[in-house]
Image: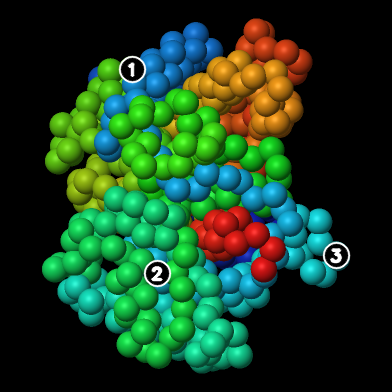
Amino acid sequence: MATFQKQFLAAIIKSLLRGKSLVQAILAYWIKSLAVTADTKDSANTSSSQSLQEFLNEAEALLLEPVNQNGLHQLVRGLRKQYSDRLRTSTEAMLPSYNHQLPNGTERGHYLALDVGGSTLRVALVELHGRVAKVGKESGIVSMMNFSITPEIKKLEGMAFFDWMAARIRETLDAQYDHLHGPDQPLLMSMAWSFPIEQTSLKGGKLSAMGKGFLASTGLTGQDLGQIIETACGKQGLNVELQAIVNDSSACLLSESYSHTSTRFGLILGTGVNIAAYLPVLTMGKSKLGQRPAEWTHLIVNSEISMFGTGVLPLNRWDHQLREAHAHPDFQPLEMLVSGMYLGEICRLILVEAIEKTGVFGGTVPASLEKPYSLATETLSMIQNDTSDELDEACKGFALRHPSPHTLTTSDLSFLRQIATFVSKRSSALVAASVYAFWQLRVDAQIEFVDSLPESSPLRPQAEADRDLENTTVAFNGSVIENYPGYLDSCQNYLDEMVASQKDLKGPRKVQLVSAKESSLMGAAVALASIQGNA
């Protein structure tokens, strides 16, 4: 009885301190007691083949043991071989761009930059003031307008979509930048394009099917994207010249390299995953380089890294379930383990199994979670953001998204939080291994490039400095690596451990993940500025 009295008084005092009345406090304690009793009865009536802790131990072992240091180094060896092979022969991955030089930091001028994504068109004026700019004169986006690409706009066929784009560009220019263009003053324009394209020059390429519900390629497949956009702008009376087209990962690399000279990689990790790398040309198969100038020594490579990992990634039973239900299980094996599109679904598969085996969540699967891809990665992020002991906010948020006849308990959400931690930590380890393998490849390729140069070559000093680069920057952008709680720190820690294990290089090395804000727009502008020089 004394124990009950202490518990009762403690609960009442805690509620009163939170601003509740005495009656509210007593009612709250009574309701909570009933819920605990009901949960106890539910648990007793549930046929559980495994305890919660046993299930958690098994999940941790299946998800994280394969990405210990030994496992990661084995994965790195497998990925490196795939990288090297596809650099030489693949027509779908390790795609050479037409960006063959990084910015030197002296580029200046104002540029119209477009960012065409799956749900938004952004039109911005970007001003570049040089790498070393006066305070208050830093490079950046002067102003920007966003336009939603609605399902109705996605259904616009052929030129109708690009006419819509041109009208939005006209709208933006008329509103804010009318003084920057005219009959005798063309405005230079660059674009980040988040869809497939067979690039044939820095400013053009053959339009491919766009996917994601877009019909814009109808009747235009194989035509030059740059010319299509300039034609549409001409109809609007716009005097613009599209001179640079880049993908999102290349834009990320270029954006950060403008301010950080050590940048050699661009990482995108949100709904999907991709990496761009600045590599010596000698890593590429000659047939892939095509007619690019012989004097180019390096270029940016779009890895399409989501497609890598077949046969070398560590898979468990939930990964196999995910693959079995997927229309194209072998298309993007890495992406299926690390990106925001799939992290929630992996957790859902684990949770559904756990409910059946352990009786967690009252042994009842919320109806909404019966549907594939119904557990969003954003929901997991919300749960992991709640660091309180009782997880009240997480419980409320989850219950709103996934109502159930069972009243959620702290224990339920704590269990899901642990599973989400395992899944996201594994993702960060795999991404770190993918970056590290790429960094290793680049270091070795740079050594080979230096060795290929005559001692008297004017290229040698810069090439040697690049070979011995102590700090390498990996620019990043994307909702998962930017916003998911603890993800960035975890990824950096895995990277640090792998780089520290590299003992055969001259001097200490560091591979640093650095955020590249608004990288699509900034990178597109920098791509253009790099070929224009000082404007």
Q: Which residue is at the front of the view, 125 or 493?
A: 125
Label 2 belongs to which residue? Answer: 120
Mark before the other along the chain sequence, 1 or 2:
2
Q: Secondary structure at mark 1?
A: loop
Mark on residue 134? 3
Q: Amino acid at mark 2?
A: Thr
Mark on residue 123? none
Q: Position of residue 255 (x, y in %)?
A: 60, 53
Say whether residue 121 is left or right of residue 132.
Answer: left
Say whether residue 422 is left or right of residue 366.
Answer: right
Is residue 244 visible in the rendered image? The answer is yes
Q: Position of residue 291 (x, y in %)?
A: 36, 42
In percent of the image, x 27 and y 36: which residue is there?
91
Q: Amino acid at mark 3?
A: Lys
Query: In front: mark 1 or mark 3?
Result: 3
Label 1 belongs to which residue? Answer: 312
In percent of the image, x 65 and y 8: which residue is there?
504
* Scheme of image coloration: rainbow
Mark before the other along the chain sequence, 2 or 3:
2
